[in-house]
Image: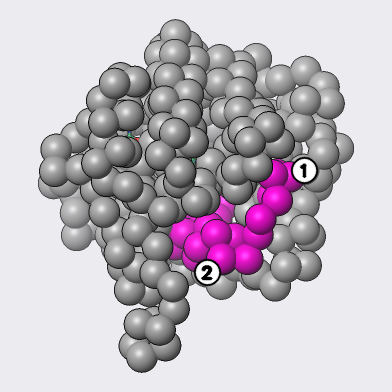
Amino acid sequence: MAEANLRYSPRVYVAGNTGMVGSAICRKMSAENYCVIKPSTRVDLTNQNDVNQMVSELRPDWIFLAAARVGGIHANSTYPADFVYVNLMIECNLIRAAFENDVKKLLFLGSSCIYPRNCPQPIKEEYLLSDYLEPSNKPYAIAKIAGIIMAQSFSSQYGCNYISVMPSNLYGPYDNFDLKESHVIPALLRKTHEAKMSGASYVEIWGTGRPFREFLHVDDLADACLFLMRNYDSPELINIGSGYDQTVFELARIIKEVVGYQGEIRFNPAMPDGTPRKLLDISRLKALGWNPSISLRDGLRLTYRWYLENENVARK
Ligand SMILES: NC(=O)c1ccc[n+]([C@@H]2O[C@H](COP(=O)([O-])OP(=O)(O)OC[C@H]3O[C@@H](n4cnc5c(N)ncnc54)[C@H](OP(=O)(O)O)[C@@H]3O)[C@@H](O)[C@H]2O)c1
């Protein structure tokens, strides 16, 4: 406690504080005794005037930009206009407002899914924009890439200290369990749980189960984001992941075990698989001294427990 009080304590604003990533960053910052500030009511971050006013009133020293329109394959292909428009507007408004209000440091969240579809594996930071994108989430990827370029451009033209991170697939408390919106882990946890409760003999999963995916618990991500805010001052991208991957088939097997479901897992190869493999090279982050600490199995157990305790408030 004494050490925390002696440390320079920036005023911190987390855009997207109600979401999975934003709430994890807020929990981490509060646990570390940072001064976390937020507007008294929700501000629509696509509205430039409202964002300018909010940032000039809050006067944060640090901004974590974790607000975004986010979703899985189904949401991306159903709402491409929302994915490109909302994300571009949020980034434009917040990055510009940060600059105009002398925010000392900003962390922008990209995503591993915006690297080219057929990247060599594991994916190094320099592979961004080196080949064609995955078609199913192109509008989201283009918007997110624009955010990274914007953060880098403000850094190079005006000397701002804006950093951009590329997290792998995330999961944890406050994830979105709505089957039309969700990513693979919340979708599988919910489907498997409901199959267990209803006594269904099988759970159906989109795709072949063959793609490889890397996952990181959101509390590890929040820890890495704070670590980078303290220790990293370069506009060069930096990957944040667990450093290992497994097939969706293997993931489904672990989830079945964590949930305690006795039925069968069936794959539906008629539905899209998405990118065949997505494993981040996290050597740049490890060289700085950060390592993940939550295993996939433990993280899934924690997330399932959170879901059971919060079933009535979880997004679904
Ligand atoms: N989830 C993943 O697996 C993953 C992986 C890599 C990177 N990321 C990145 O992490 C960031 C956060 O993702 P997440 O999973 O935490 O998403 P999330 O749970 O859906 O949270 C999104 C947050 O953004 C806010 N938001 C969206 N539109 C807004 C608007 N117009 N005005 C104000 N707030 C708005 C939401 O608030 P309201 O609910 O009030 O709209 C919510 O707080 C994103 O930049 C994403 O690209 C996520």
Among numbered discs 2 and 1, the one appearing first in the sequence = 1
In the image, farthest residue toward the top: 81
Q: Picture quarter containing residue 160?
A: top right
Left or right, 182 with respect to 174, comes to right
Please, what secondary structure does the residue beneath circle 2 have?
Answer: loop
Residue 142 location, x and y as percent?
Answer: 61, 19
Residue 150 location, x and y as percent?
Answer: 61, 28
Q: Nearer the viewer, residue 268 or 44?
A: 44
Mark 2 neighbour class, 10 Å CA radius: few under 14, some 14 to 19, many 20 or more: some
Residue 33 shown in magenta: no
Q: Is residue 268 visible?
A: no
Q: Which residue is mark 2?
A: 294
Q: Quadrant of ligand 1?
A: top left
Quadrant where the C terminus is found in the figure: top left
Left or right, 29 with respect to 252, comes to left
Q: Which residue is mark 1?
A: 125
Q: Which residues are magenta?
A: 211-238
Residue 212 shown in magenta: yes
Type of amino acid at the residue the image marks with label 1: Glu
Q: Nearer the viewer, residue 103 or 279?
A: 103
Please, what secondary structure does the residue beneath circle 1 have?
Answer: helix
Nearer mark to the viewer, of 2 and 1: 1
Q: Residue at x 39, y 69 (%)?
A: 9
Q: Residue at x 57, y 51 (%)?
A: 215
The colour scheme is one colour
Q: Nearer the viewer, residue 70 or 251?
A: 70
Give the Cα separation between the discs numbered 2 and 1.
23 Å
